[in-house]
Image (cartoon, grey):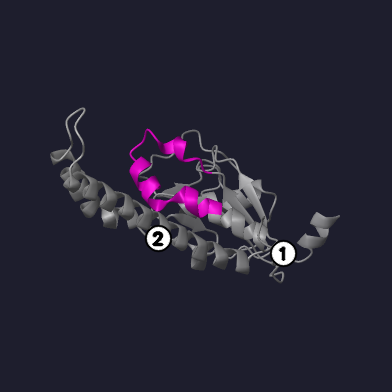
């Protein structure tokens, strides 16, 4: 049975969300950006130790596992569960704040497999983007907010100010987006977050994503 809906009061605000390298989530509202918690990175030393313990005590084929091997395996599984819980807790707390402060949310429909073969893969997994995205969608549904999933294609190439598209994708190391058409420069992820709003049909009036007067009436018409 799904949780009972708990609608929140309207705020008159919208927000765009881009999943990124520098932060787990970069938004059109500076106060709602989500830095990397790096729970996996912090647990890596212990995980490596348990892996070595298991490797040293790995039983030969057909032989029963030793107590030391089973203990290391249990400790490793326990730590993995702890990291998963930490990621879920971080994602839920962030999602609750975003949903409480905005009526509509335009979020990049990120798929982890997009980064599976790149140097970003490990960082993306540690950031738990998938877990955070899921929490945002569920929190939006619970509180009656509209969460728009935006296809990620070309969002790093499109100018959020004039709509022009760059001829080439920006290298991951280049963190500033400069439009060749209008000359506007802005942090790469902030530009992408604003592009989410535009693609979702929401009109950001400023850095905090407030709706311009009458926009609700125009959308309802």
Which region is colored magenta? 110-134
- The 10 Å Cα crowd at callout 2, few under 14, some 14 to 19, many 20 or more, is some
Residue located at (43% from left, 54% from top): 24
Question: Measuring 51% from the left and 48% from the top, which residue is drawn there?
Answer: 183
Residue at mark 1 to residue at mark 2: CA–CA distance = 38 Å
Residue 212 is tagged as 1
- Residue 34 falls left or right of residue 144: left
Q: Local crowd at mark 1 within 10 Å, few (<14), some, or many (≥20)?
A: few
Res 197 seen here: yes
| Image quarter in which the N terminus is found | bottom right
Q: Quadrant of the C terminus?
A: bottom right
Main SS of the magenta part reads helix
- Reading the chain from its start, which is encountered first: label 1 or label 2? 2
Q: Going by the picture, which residue comes out furthest to the right?
A: 221
Q: Position of residue 120 (x, y in %)?
A: 36, 42
Q: How far from the left and from the top, in percent, is residue 212? A: 72, 64
Secondary structure under tag 2 reads helix
Q: Is residue 79 magenta?
A: no
Residue drawn at x 21%, y 28% as measured from the top left: 62
Residue 208 falls in image quadrant:
bottom right
Q: Is residue 130 magenta?
A: yes
Residue 82: give x, y in percent of width and height.
36, 58
- Lateral position of residue 90 relative to residue 1, left or right: left
Residue farthest top in this picture: 61
The answer to whether any part of residue 120 appears in the image is no
Instruction: Evaluate if marks 1 and 2 touch, with contact meaning CB atoms under 8 Å apart.
Output: no
* Residue under label 2: 86
SS at badge 1: loop
């Amino acid at each position: 049975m799904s949780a009972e809906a708990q609608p929140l009061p309207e705020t008159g605000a919208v927000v765009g969300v881009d999943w990124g390298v520098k932060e787990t989530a970069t938004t059109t509202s500076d106060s709602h950006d989500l830095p990397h918690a790096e729970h996996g990175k912090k647990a890596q030393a212990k995980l490596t130790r348990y892996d070595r313990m298991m490797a040293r005590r790995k039983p030969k084929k057909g032989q029963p596992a030793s107590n030391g091997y089973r203990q290391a395996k249990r400790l490793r599984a326990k730590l993995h569960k702890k990291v998963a819980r930490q990621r879920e807790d971080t994602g839920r707390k962030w999602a609750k704040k975003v949903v409480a402060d905005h009526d509509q949310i335009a979020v990049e429909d990120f798929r982890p497999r997009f980064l599976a073969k790149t140097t970003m893969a490990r960082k993306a997994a540690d950031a738990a983007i998938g877990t955070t995205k899921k929490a945002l969608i569920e929190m939006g549904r619970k509180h009656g907010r509209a969460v728009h999933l935006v296809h990620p294609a070309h969002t790093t190439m499109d100018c959020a100010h004039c709509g022009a598209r760059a001829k080439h994708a920006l290298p991951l190391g280049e963190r500033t987006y400069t439009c060749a058409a209008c000359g506007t420069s802005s942090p790469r992820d902030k530009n992408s977050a604003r592009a989410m709003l535009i693609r979702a049909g929401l009109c950001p009036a400023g850095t905090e994503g407030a709706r311009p007067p009458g926009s609700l009436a125009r959308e309802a018409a």
